[in-house]
Image (cartoon, grey):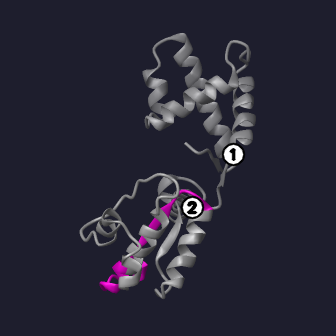
Amino acid sequence: MHDKLLRQLTPSQRKAIFHVEGPLLVLAGPGSGKTRVITYRVAALIDSGIQPYNICAITFTNKAAEEMRQRVVALGTPAGPHISTFHSLCVAILRQYADRAAISPNFSIYDESNQARCIKQAVKDCELDTTNFPPPRCLENISKLKNNLIDVDIFKIEADDFLRKTLARIYARYQHILAEHNALDFD
């Protein structure tokens, strides 16, 4: 790593770049140099003998991922590090191991409008009144269940009152609709 580049960094940034053992998480506010730190870290890892295909750099936005790719190339590092957004990495993993997740590798990921359409259909298919079971609220509850890793079959068993049993029916129907369309939601 060139001394000129290192002089542009704070001590904590240099520490992050030369962190040796295990993964590294860089958390900092906007404009604080996260992309530069991660880019320089990729270069430092390659300089230390790590093969580029063994490096994975993840960021949140497409813009930051593209900027990181360009900076890595500008530093003269060889092609090969995986640089992407968190979401694109997850999609790539899901597509690669789709059979293990019992999904088709050519699935779609539904955005909020498609999710809203599916949850409305699920409530309707369960012959429920949307006044008593507002689709956005149902989707919010299903999202919470999924984020707590409570799958529909478990929730059906655990549902112990009318509202939870009804939500379990809606959840099951919602998942069925997603499966019919070979789709996943963000949860």
Q: Residue furthest left?
A: 21
Magenta highlight on residue 58: yes
Q: Which residue is mark 2?
A: 88
Asked if one can make out residue 1 in the rendered structure from this viewpoint, the answer is no
The answer to whether the residues at label 2 and label 1 have Cβ atoms under 8 Å apart is no
Query: Is residue 121 located in the magenta-colored stretch of the structure?
Result: no
Local secondary structure at mark 2: helix
Q: What is the three-letter code of the residue carrying label 2?
A: Ser
Instruction: Count the marks.
Output: 2
- Identify residue type, mark 1: Asp
72 left or right of 67 in image: left
Q: Is residue 11 visible?
A: yes
- Tell me if mark 2 has few (under 14), some (14-19) or many (20+) residues whose alpha carbon lies within 10 angstroms of its own: some
- Considering only order in the chain, which callout, 1 or 2, is on the residue closer to the N terminus? 2
Per the image, the residue denoted by label 1 is 111
SS at badge 1: loop
**Residue at image point 50% right, 79% down:** 72
